[in-house]
Image (cartoon, helix red, strand yellow):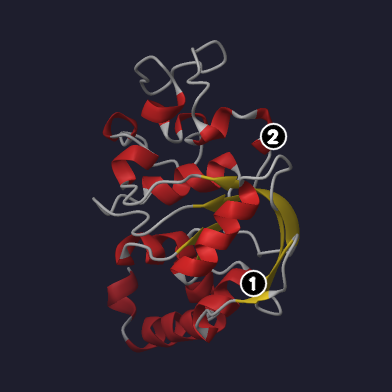
Amino acid sequence: MPMQPFENFTSVVVPLDRANIDTDAIIPKQFLKSIQRTGFGPYLFDEWRYLDHGEPGMDCTDRPLNKDFVLNDPRYQGARILLARHNFGCGSSREHAPWALADYGFRVLIAPSFADIFHQNAMKNGILPVVLDSALVDELFALAGDEEPLTIEVDLHNLRLSPNGRAQIEIDIDPFHHRCLIHGLDDIGLTLEHADAITAYEQQRAAEAPWLFA
């Protein structure tokens, strides 16, 4: 499935007030058998979200929910922004973790820091990981703790977040990843930008060494 261009949007924020959330918590190991990139959303944070043990292919419709887990709070249904603490995405480098987050519907993650490999995998799968100062993250958690959920407008084109109740926040992203997200370019998409040159080279090689293409 090709990566979709990143569109500006406004969403409520899910405040997941934990540090060092590893990839096994994001998507447990038993779900790594599939490499389809889709279908992982129902199993996101499976061991925290449900009271029973999840397995691949299980129908999650009637599984018992952990009502104390924030993702099961009705106020956050349909949220596209996740707020967390330090070192989000640590642990193994499984790409299934951003697959599960994206399949659930998250397009933005906010934390003081991310594990390096997870940060790269998130970008390659159309998710924007936003690194903010710990004090600023504390402020956002305080706002998210109000009776009404915190809402943030995400403007990636102009590199800013606009939370309700405070001034705009400037975000930093390197130009390469900014272009990839805006235009929906994963590794395959970047390669296909050179499709004409690749075709021309293949035609030239076929003319120079036809025996290689027999």
Residue 179 x, y percent position in the rendering: 59, 79
Residue 128 visible: no
Query: Between 79 and 16, which is closer to the camera in this rendering?
Result: 16
Q: Amino acid at mark 2?
A: Arg
Image vertical order of residue 46 relative to residue 209, above or below = above
Q: Secondary structure at mark 2?
A: helix
Residue 50 x, y percent position in the rendering: 44, 21
Residue 48 visible: yes
Marking on residue 4: none
Q: CA distance from mark 2 to mark 1?
A: 31 Å
Mark 2 surroundings: few (<14), some (14-19) or many (≥20) residues within 10 A? some
Task: Kindly identify the residue that appears in the image at 35 percent across and 89 percent down.
Answer: 208
Query: Between 26 and 162, which is closer to the camera in this rendering?
Result: 162
* Residue highlighted by disc 1: 183
Q: Quadrant of residue 175?
A: bottom right
Task: Kindly identify the residue that appears in the image at 32 percent across and 68 percent down.
Answer: 214
Query: Between 130 and 190, which is closer to the camera in this rendering?
Result: 130
Ranked by sequence position, the earlier of labels 2 and 1 is 2
Marking on residue 75: 2
Task: Kindly identify the residue that appears in the image at 42 percent across and 35 percent down.
Answer: 45
Image vertical order of residue 57 relative to residue 35, above or below = above
Label 2 with label 1: CB-CB less than 8 Å? no
Q: Is 119 displayed left or right of 184 in the figure? A: left
Residue 205 x, y percent position in the rendering: 37, 85
Mark 1 surroundings: few (<14), some (14-19) or many (≥20) residues within 10 A? some
Q: Amino acid at mark 1?
A: His
Image vertical order of residue 56 relative to residue 52, above or below = below
